[in-house]
Image: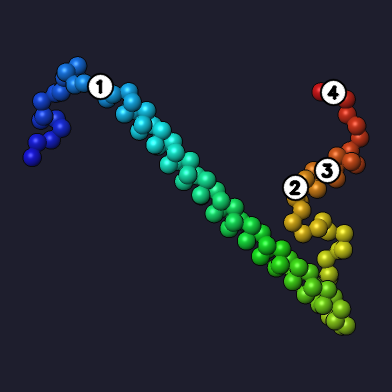
């Protein structure tokens, strides 16, 4: 069996180009198939993320109930988390950046 280095070089000037309609058909087919795949993939990913988000919300709710129950047991040295926590599912990063900005003095343009 001959390898690529042993084969005679091909003169590409002697080969006819692929007809333009065939090229357009192949490119359009690729675009349609890729678009269908990406739409299906993003739909399935969105459903899975929504399911995970709902499960996390349920777990956070259950955890809050258990923390309140632990806090109501007399004689138990349990430090319940403060009630002023941001709501579940909120964006903690925006809360963390917004609070210092309110306390910081106004600065002029840099």
**Residue 105 or 55: which is nearer the viewer?**
55
Dot label at residue 109: 4
Residue at x 82%, y 56% (from the top left corner) = 86
Distance between mark 4 and mark 3 Cα atoms:
19 Å
**Residue 7 or 75: which is nearer the viewer?**
7
Distance between mark 4 and mark 2 Cα atoms:
24 Å
Dot 3, how many residues are within 10 Å of its Cα: few (below 14), some (14-19), or many (20+)? few
Depicted 104 relative to depicted 60: above or below: above
Residue 23 visible in the displayed image? yes
Query: Percent from the top left, x then y, of residue 97?
Result: 79, 43
Q: Mark 1 points at which residue?
A: 17
- Mark 1 / mark 2, whichever is N-terminal: 1
Q: Mark 2 points at which residue?
A: 93
**Could you tell me if the residues under marks 4 and 3 are in contact, i.e. CB atoms within 8 Å?**
no
Dot 1, how many residues are within 10 Å of its Cα: few (below 14), some (14-19), or many (20+)? few
Q: Name the residue under label 3.
A: 98
Query: Percent from the top left, x then y, of residue 85?
Result: 83, 59
- Mark 4 / mark 2, whichever is N-terminal: 2
Image quarter hosting the C terminus: top right
């Amino acid at each position: 069996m001959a390898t690529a280095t042993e084969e005679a070089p091909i003169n590409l000037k002697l080969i006819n180009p692929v007809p333009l309609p065939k090229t357009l058909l192949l490119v359009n087919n690729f675009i349609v198939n890729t678009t269908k795949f990406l739409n299906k993939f993003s739909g399935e990913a969105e459903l899975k993320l929504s399911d995970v988000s709902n499960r996390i919300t349920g777990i956070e709710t259950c955890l809050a109930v258990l923390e309140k129950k632990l806090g109501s047991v007399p004689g138990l040295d349990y430090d319940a988390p403060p009630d002023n926590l941001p709501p579940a599912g909120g964006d903690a990063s925006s809360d963390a950046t917004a609070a210092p900005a309110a306390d910081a003095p106004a600065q002029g343009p840099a």
